[in-house]
Image (cartoon, grey):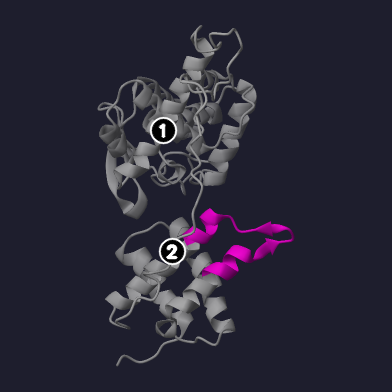
């Protein structure tokens, strides 16, 4: 029988496995660390000093407690947060089984909390055009900001992929970007003509002025010459959104949502979009087909003259199905 270890040392081994062997990003590993920190604290409070001693009932009670717990006064964890924590616990216990610490996986039979499906909220093509054409002050930073916006939308990158780009990751002759996604998986994504023009202008007239000896190979630089951070990109986008007069909330991931939605609306195959986004599972990409279906329905009820009024002359709501109300 393997020697008993403390929960914290077991979690530490698991996090090292995620970072070194699976190559997950620091951001993802930190998310696992936070969720498993809650689990470790719960086990300690219940006298469990070795994770292999936890049973199914222990983990079920952890999920129940997390669901009922308030992390601030009057605010509870959302079902998605609880589901994410359970996923971390499941991965942790599967790891212990693979490592030979135990033969039983007590988390395997725990039911995942039901998470309401939130459809992505992409920008319209017109809103994206306004965003990308919003005037900015001239200068190196303005060239950088334009290149960032064009790359986020033109290649559909995650923000972590964008800030991780090096100069050699962009091939302007081929019109492509080499992105390193989740699990350090590499993929080549077309950038498009507008993106290539914007990145070339930045490389020739912007980056040389921002670069310092410490800049290294980083593509997008801040004012001090360091690699631009996620927070820096979010601030740049927020300023562009205000200039464009867009009232809805827009994040870097919104541009990724818009990239996928506009491709599907333009007739792209969903499997091609899956490859472009770097999704491991097709089901993750297929949520965008639901978005385009909702938009098609909205456009129909807005524009079709016989969709807005019933035969007796009354206006129908957009949610009213053409066949009339359902019968019980």
Instruction: Say which quadrant the N terminus sits in.
Output: bottom left
Depth check: 35 or 19 in front?
35
Specify whether 62 is left or right of 162: right
Mark 2 nearby-residue class (10 Å; few <14, some 14–19, many ≥20) = few
Label 2: state its secondary structure: loop
Is 71 included in the stretch rendered in magenta? yes
Q: Which residues are magenta?
A: 63-84
> Where in the figure is residue 149, as x and y percent of width and height?
48, 30
Is 161 included in the stretch rendered in magenta? no
Depth check: 44 or 9 in front?
44
Mark 1 nearby-residue class (10 Å; few <14, some 14–19, many ≥20) = some
Q: Is residue 37 something one can see in this rendering?
A: no
Image-quadrant location for residue 177: top left
The residue where tag 1 is placed is 290
Q: Residue at x 43, y 62 (%)?
A: 87
Q: Residue at x 30, y 38 (%)?
A: 274
Q: Residue at x 48, y 17 (%)?
A: 299
Give the mark toward the camera: 2 or 1: 2
| Residue projecting furthest to the right | 73
Depth check: 177 or 31 in front?
31
> Where in the figure is residue 154, as x and y percent of width and height?
39, 28
Specify whether 249 is left or right of 39: right
Q: Is residue 217 above or below residue 324?
A: below
> Where in the figure is residue 198, as x and y percent of width and height?
42, 24
Which badge, 2 or 1, is on the more N-terminal residue?
2
Q: Is residue 38 above or below residue 55?
A: above
Residue 147: mark = none
Label 1: state its secondary structure: helix
The residue where tag 2 is placed is 111
Q: Residue at x 35, y 92 (%)?
A: 3
> Where in the figure is residue 55, as x and y percent of width and height?
43, 80
Between the residue at mark 2 and the residue at mark 1, the CA separation in whole angstroms equals 26 Å
């Amino acid at each position: 029988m393997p020697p008993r270890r403390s929960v914290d040392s077991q979690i530490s081994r698991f996090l090292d496995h995620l970072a070194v062997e699976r190559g997950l990003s620091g951001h993802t590993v930190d998310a696992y660390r936070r969720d498993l920190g809650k689990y470790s604290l719960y086990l300690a409070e219940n006298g469990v000093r070795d994770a292999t001693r936890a049973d199914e009932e222990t983990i079920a009670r952890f999920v129940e407690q997390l669901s009922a717990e308030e992390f601030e006064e009057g605010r509870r964890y959302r079902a998605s947060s609880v589901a994410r924590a359970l996923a971390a616990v499941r991965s942790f216990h599967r790891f212990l089984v693979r490592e030979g610490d135990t033969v039983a996986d007590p988390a395997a039979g725990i039911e995942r909390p039901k998470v309401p499906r939130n459809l992505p909220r992409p920008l319209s093509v017109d809103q994206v055009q306004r965003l990308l054409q919003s005037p900015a002050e001239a200068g190196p930073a303005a060239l950088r900001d334009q290149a960032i916006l064009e790359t986020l939308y033109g290649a559909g990158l995650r923000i972590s992929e964008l800030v991780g780009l090096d100069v050699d990751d962009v091939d302007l002759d081929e019109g492509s970007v080499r992105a390193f996604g989740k699990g350090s998986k590499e993929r080549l994504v077309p950038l498009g003509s507008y993106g290539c023009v914007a990145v070339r202008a930045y490389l020739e007239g912007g980056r040389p002025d921002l670069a310092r000896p410490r800049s290294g190979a980083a593509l997008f630089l801040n004012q001090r010459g360091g690699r631009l951070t996620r927070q820096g990109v979010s601030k740049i986008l927020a300023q562009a959104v205000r200039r464009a007069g867009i009232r809805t909330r827009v994040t870097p991931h919104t541009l990724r949502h818009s990239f996928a939605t506009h491709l599907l609306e333009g007739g792209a195959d969903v499997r091609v979009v899956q490859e472009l986004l770097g999704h491991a599972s097709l089901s993750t990409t297929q949520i965008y087909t639901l978005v385009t279906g909702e938009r098609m329905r909205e456009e129909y009820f807005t524009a079709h003259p016989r969709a807005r009024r019933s035969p007796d002359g009354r206006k129908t709501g957009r949610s009213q199905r053409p066949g009339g109300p359902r019968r019980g």
